[in-house]
Amino acid sequence: MPARYLTVDELTSRARGLAAAHPDRAVLRRIGYSRAGEPIRLLSIGRGSRHALVVAGPHANEPVGGMTALRLARYLARPDRPGRAMDTTWHFVLCLDPDGARRNERWLKGPMTFAQHYRHFFRPGFAEQPEWLPTEPGAEPMPETRALLGLQDELRPYLQCSLHGVDVGGSFVQLTRRLPGLPERLGRSAADLRIPVELGPYDAFFWPSPGPGVYDMPRPQETDQFHSLPAATATSTWFHPHAYGTVTAVVEAPMWGVEEVGDTSAHPDPPGALEIISNSLRQDALFLAGLLERVRPGLPATVGPLLAPVDEYLAICGGLADEWAPEAALRETGGLPPLNRARIMALRIAARRLIVRTAGLLHQMLAAGHDTDGAEGAEVTGVRASLDLFLTRRCDAFEADCRARWIPVHDQVEHQFRIVLAASELAARFREPRAVRA
């Protein structure tokens, strides 16, 4: 297994090789095209009567899933594969967002530092992420989303696994239906591979947990995310096949591990920690917004894909800073859940990540072929210098503050591999009868 992440072309090449080596058990086909015309490919393994669907690359900046998909496919294509897989056809979407994934390929080969990663990081805005259904009345899903929805309707899988790679933190799993036994399997794999388990992740901060590191996705009208976030979990592609009896597992494996995300001991000073998190987020966001406004009039139209998430991030920073201020967060009703060390660290990571992602995208916009002549060019040059220093300092502080350590790529893949196989075994054992969609 490579010691680095694979590009979109490398994933495709290896999938082709696997299909050619096992023509009796493996098929590679196209299920759609991206907005830029990239093919979205599906690798299927087996001839079973039931179906398991694995979706890699739903977030452009999370490349581990494609490698996990290949690891699973190679394992399941073996003639001696375990009996529990014999009646299952497995389907692997190699990369759901190939357009966005290609924008991240500059950091894939390392060095694996925060500065290298966030300087070349890309993730589209919320509305451009293909796992989310459109929220505007009458709006059509993106081509990538339509491809996934069509596949779900075609397969009616008993299990869907969405493979994600959180940049900083620990491993956790989000479920649309409970899988008894999964927390224990997650814990064993994480301990074996020295991967922290998140016990209060930002993505599932308000969600019930049936066991360490596993979280139940909320239904409509249940508390979902922070008020400032554009979340719509219950109307995502995770829930789309729910009527078929599908259980969806969103499996997170971290790039950099942080031990404190698994520490449920009491925090010595939650109000003081929240005050620092809230104030720092607000001040840094205002600083970046000021830099952006200095150069916005001269930005070329070609930076649109970078500008959209920057505007989105800056728009939510103020609201999150308000929600995390001690006077709001520690209210007895309507505030945050009890704050231990793990939850405080999750908020510290979320706040710092928002800032370095925003700064990294803005840095890329200013590095993308600007004319540096005249007064306008001098302004861009000055902003770029300020931004470069800011990004370097914030990345260094982020890495040091969290005491983050790099998780080897093969360990990230192995962990997801184990969790997907565990989920398939448990889902087959505990799944509800499939409902018939009206």
Image: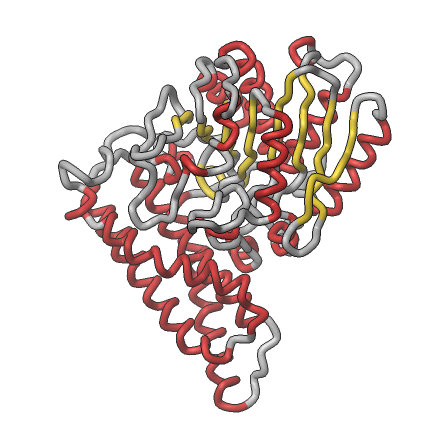
Residue visible at 47% across and 47% down?
134
Q: Left or right: 402 with respect to 146?
A: left
Residue 405 vertical placement versus 178 (above, below): below
Residue 436 image position (x, y, % from top left) = 52, 20
The answer, for residue 110, to whether it is visible in the render is: no
Residue visible at 70% across and 32% down?
70
Residue 148 vs residue 171, the one in the foreground:
148
Residue visible at 44% across and 60% down?
358
Residue 347 image position (x, y, % from top left) = 33, 44
Query: Which quadrant of the structure image shows residue 288?
Result: bottom left
Residue 159 vertical placement versus 297 (above, below): above
Residue 254 vs residue 152, the one in the foreground:
152
Residue 76 image position (x, y, % from top left) = 72, 20
Residue 374 vs residue 192, the one in the foreground:
374
Q: Left or right: 327 with respect to 279?
A: left
Q: Left or right: 421 with respect to 266?
A: right
Q: Report the number of discs.
A: 0
Residue 153 vertical placement versus 85 (above, below): below
The answer, for residue 80, to whether it is visible in the render is: yes
Single out the residue that lies furthest toward the front: 438
